[in-house]
Amino acid sequence: MSLNFFRRVAFGLSPNDKKPDDPLAWALNQVNTVPDLLWPGSIPSEKETRKKYGEWVYGNRKVLRKKFKNDKDAYKKAKDELRIKTGERFFELNEHAIRHYQTKYSSQPVFERLWLFWGNHFAISEKDSLAEFSTGPYQREIIRPNMIKTFEDMVQAVTTSWCMIHHLDNSESVGPNSKRGLNSRDTINENHARELLELHTVSPSAGYTQEDVIQLAYIMTGWGHKWNNKELETGDIWFDQEKHQKGEKIVLGKAYKNDAKRELAKVIHDLATHPVCINFVSTKLCRHFITDEPTLEMINPVIDVWKESDGNLIEIHKEVLRQAFKYNDTTHKFHPPEVWLMQLSKIFDLNIPLSSDRMKYTFELKPNKRQRQLSWILREIGHSPYRAKQPNGWSDLEVDWVSPELLLRRLWFASIELPRLVQNVNYEHDFILQCLKNNFDEHEKMASLIHQFRFGTTDNDLGRKYGIICNLPGVLKV
Amino acid sequence: MNCTRRNFLIGGSTTLFFSGFFAKISSASMQKKNLIIISLRGGMDGLTAVPVIGDKRLKKLRNKLILENVLKLNSDFGLHPKLEIFHKLWQDNKAAFVHATNIPYTGRSHFDGQNLMETGAHIPYQEKTGWLGRGLMTSDIIGKGLAISLPMPLLLRGVPQNNNFFPSPDFVQTKLIDSIYNEFSGEHNELIKSTLDTIKQRPISMQIATDSDDRDKLAKEAAKQLKNPGGPRVAVFELDGFDTHAAQGGVDGSHADELEEVNNIVTTLHENLGNAFDNTLILTLTEFGRTIKQNGGYGTEHGYGSAILMAGGLLKKSQVYTDWPGLKKRDLFEGRDLNSTLDARAVYNSAMSICFNKDPDYLRREVFWGDDLPNLTEDLFKI
């Protein structure tokens, strides 16, 4: 078995890691429990950051916009001050640090890779101020604990989370025959219903119709934030009977009788256990860990385990890992920029993220350059994790990640930024050789490509070495 | 109000002129023609960019957003003073506007709207390719798209080997590529290898680090590439910030700042394209317009009908092309927005037809699923 299995299902081996004797057992043992978050700094709850989100929205929309309606420069200045006061410029940076720290130091790195997968499957794309305040906490509090439950549990939790409901506008959806609908002539917003079908569960191959989308949207009416004058759209999620569409609904041929808030759990049960859903998500898992074009031989065992275990994610994850192990030496998988960065950070023990002490924030000044560094790098290499452009999240296909500029950005990072992140004690050429040996079967070949620079330890020399090493096909891919 | 409804070629009559289409394009098709799209994200307010000056209702509904020193286009329409270059080109028949138009999307979500303005479809997130990418692909124009952004925009997806230009913060030693290039062997490395080829074949000017926040430098480089007879034929620029819910202002507000950015890009392209400007079309693209009425924050909300700003020597003449729906309450979309009387995709389809030398009806079928889009090639462009 080649060493790249440790990068295929995790982030490679750090200079301090001992190579596991039994790689498959090593991987399988990591998915039974939810590892604690290790970040020693601040880990605010979703509720706390949402409160700050509310302060930002209220202050901007209700106070500043009115106060400075004739003065755009003063408005801009006051807005910037409010950003600092509410942490609008800070929380995302802190979340990136929590996330990066976890993938680097967790004793269950395989679990962490799966965490990234599910956060992206149930993606919150760049909308309003979600990335600034809420997407990170959502991934920690909604995605993470459900990774040892069933897929259905995960869908239930995601679908009724504040973050997803806000992201997909379900609070604005009103049943036309509901009390509110009849009074206001408001109607449904199909957005969330459509994505629940298309992206989160059954996918278009289930052959649902526009009418199915509408009917599911009817079932979902009433689920939204509790609105008040102060919190605006950041109030907790509840079920508002006055917005709920009355009567029977039919989704994918199955009737759901009028049952208020209980309708949603019933339809999610049916969607999350639908054979096409099982097929769709199993394929996506195989695509993520094995190859862009997984075969039925890879996917079918995962589907079988899914069915036998009634969608138990622990069992499903294990089967995906077995298949990833089985096909490790015969398939290739391209890694998107964030995973690549996390792997380099671990393999070469780079000096990111910033220490939790230096990450401290007092809501008085703009976050400093070092505090912004990791997030800046992520943006520059084209993969700021909470800022996918669409609700279908970041692509898992090589073709979407290979543009001239995106490749140049990787060269830029490895040859110019990375040398500044190498710890002083690791400047010696032997250190690189040892790291390569830990992680790559073809380490001797790789070493030969940088042999001519072996005596150099300036940033420039390190830039040449890392610029080459980090952009080799066996590093961009497994 | 002396602004009357204007009629244009619609529906059935389009077939009448097809017979002559190929004959006309064949002589002009020798020259490389460029199509440049500037995406205006957030909802560009057509009534701020191209205000209707003959209708007092606009001033009444927007008493805090009044434009002074409007540049005059004709008796009915003016132009925002920040759009100077369009006014200058207008005198030479090299600027024109389509008004009261939008993609067929009446929801008011930026994300759905932006997705649809790029895919050209009816249902958000259903299509994974852009109308421009499909247009290039079906016209067999491969490897000629240039995006001025980091990832490949959805608009250009659907055709392989596009280039993009959005340089990193520092100079990258592309000679590093020589050290790794030969390592990319085997079929599974072909995509990266061919992309490395694209990088290696770039002109020196595209290898030099530029501040990617400096839109002027990016536009200069884009013009240089487009001017090259073997260079790209399509370029896509991205601008955002048109979502001005507050302090939108008139001549100097936040919407004016954004229009100034458009003006700057077009100015730079015009200056640097030289003669190639005569074989170029520049068109803007947005997800929707904005409400007619100002809101409590002296901004505007998400609306419907907007305008397309156009520049370039391939335009037929200076004109405001519109079937003007009027601003009376009953004429407005849902009683609040400028209506759309023309599917904006008809303009883009016709523009692709001109620039890619393809029958507009063929493109309409291949790119827009045969949707009922009037052929505007003869009305808007030189053929």
Image (tube, rainbow, N blue to C red):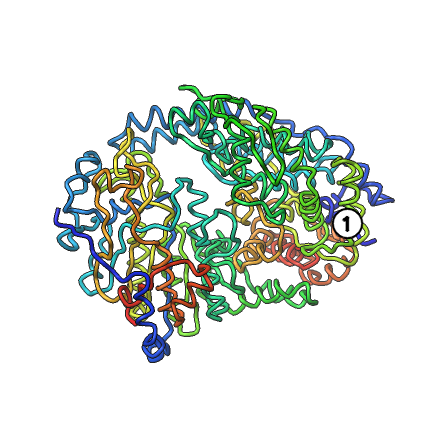
Q: Is residue A172 left or right of residue B50?
A: right
Give the total number of marks visible in the rendering: 1
Residue at the image position 46 percent from the left and 59 percent from the top = B369
The answer to whether residue B205 is above or below residue A204 is: below
Three-letter residue code for mark 1: Asn
Residue at the image position 40 percent from the left and 57 percent from the top = B218
The answer to whether residue B16 is above or below residue A292 is: below
Q: Is residue A305 left or right of residue A401?
A: right
The answer to whether residue A297 is above or below residue A126 is: below
The answer to whether residue A311 is above or below residue A81 is: below
* Foreground residue among B184 and B255: B255
Q: Quadrant of residue B289?
A: top left
Q: Tag 1, which secondary structure?
A: helix
Measured as percent of width and height from the top left, residue A382 is found at 54, 49
Residue at the image position 27 percent from the left and 62 percent from the top = B9
Residue at the limit of the structure toward the right, as seen here: A21
Which residue matches tag 1? Answer: A300
Measured as percent of width and height from the top left, residue B286 is found at 36, 49
Measured as percent of width and height from the top left, residue B31 is found at 36, 76
* Foreground residue among A147 and A72: A147
Q: Residues within 10 Å of mark 1 (few under 14, many from 20)?
A: some
Q: Quadrant of residue A444?
A: bottom right
Q: Is residue B310 left or right of residue A236?
A: left
